[in-house]
């Protein structure tokens, strides 16, 4: 388990490694489709899902940084998120990067959209999860959001799951999968594919897996 970060801050030590010089955040976000996910074999300018691609190889095809210049890397920017500050929180998320925008959660399940070139906050969403929870299985953590259909999806430590508008961060829906008071929590990296969001559910006595419809109408029908 990685050490907790106190205070929590997001530092992009090698900005050029993932983001070419001409990459910039766009006002209208690029919508990730199932076709995009199916056709992507490696991460590149975009890192559209956890691990870079569905194969989870974590390989980037970018070549601007190489053995001849890696020693010259310097910090590009640092942004203080003001979230998850304290020894109980962890910061292990794999950022999703789409069209110059980085989507990243903190150990408090607050979610941020940042300009990947400058670190500027585009929007933030506060999770409002209960701060007293002694039954979390694997630490106060969120290992990464999923993006698809113009939404940002994430599970929360209180056992609920949310979808946010990719452009504004507005809450679109929230559904309760399990009750955190019974020892359940969602801390893993989440996946989207073909209208489904996939998540595991951590528990103090074990774990379970769920796949459910990403559209709220299907939640209501179920």
Image: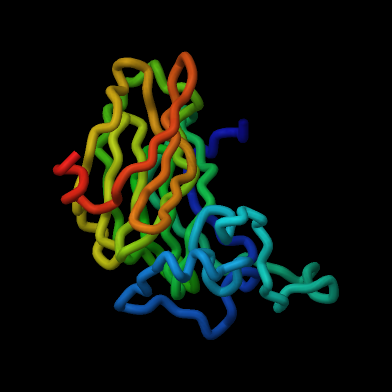
Position in image of residue 135 (x %, y %):
40, 17
Quadrant location of the C terminus in the rendered image: top left
- Image side of residue 138 versus residue 168, left or right: right
The residue lying at 28 percent from left, 67 percent from top is: 167
Q: Which quadrant would residue 29 be assigned to in this image?
A: bottom left
Q: Position of residue 8 (x, y in %)?
A: 47, 44
| Quarter of the view holding residue 44 | bottom right
Q: Would residue 15 be seen by someone viewing this image from the given angle? A: no
Q: In this view, does 56 lie to the left or right of 168?
A: right
Horizontal side of residue 136 vs 3, given as left or right: left
Work out whether residue 99 or residue 122 is closer to the camera in this orientation and state it: 99
Q: Can residue 185 be seen in this view?
A: yes
Question: What's the residue at 45%, 66% (across, down)?
Answer: 119
Residue under the point 67% across and 74% down? 62
Relative to 87, is 114 above or below?
Answer: below
Rendered position, 12 above or below 117: above
């Amino acid at each position: 388990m990685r050490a907790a970060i106190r205070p929590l801050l997001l530092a992009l030590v090698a900005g050029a490694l993932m983001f070419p010089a001409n990459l910039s955040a766009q006002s209208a976000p690029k919508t990730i489709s199932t076709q995009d996910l199916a056709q992507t074999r490696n991460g590149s300018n975009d890192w559209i899902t956890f691990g870079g691609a569905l194969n989870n190889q974590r390989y980037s095809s970018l070549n601007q940084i190489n053995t001849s210049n890696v020693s010259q890397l310097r910090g590009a920017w640092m942004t203080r998120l003001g979230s998850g500050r304290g020894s109980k929180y962890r910061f292990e998320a794999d950022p999703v990067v789409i069209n110059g925008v980085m989507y990243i959660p903190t150990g408090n399940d607050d979610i941020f959209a940042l300009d990947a070139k400058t670190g500027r906050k585009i929007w933030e969403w506060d999770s409002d999860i209960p701060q007293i929870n002694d039954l979390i299985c694997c630490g106060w953590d969120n290992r990464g959001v999923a993006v698809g259909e113009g939404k940002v999806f994430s599970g929360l430590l209180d056992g609920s799951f949310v979808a946010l508008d990719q452009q504004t961060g507005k809450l679109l829906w929230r559904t309760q999968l399990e009750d955190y008071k019974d020892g359940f929590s969602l801390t893993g990296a989440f996946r989207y594919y073909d209208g489904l969001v996939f998540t595991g559910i951590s528990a103090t006595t074990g774990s379970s897996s769920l796949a459910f419809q990403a559209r709220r109408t299907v939640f209501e029908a179920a």
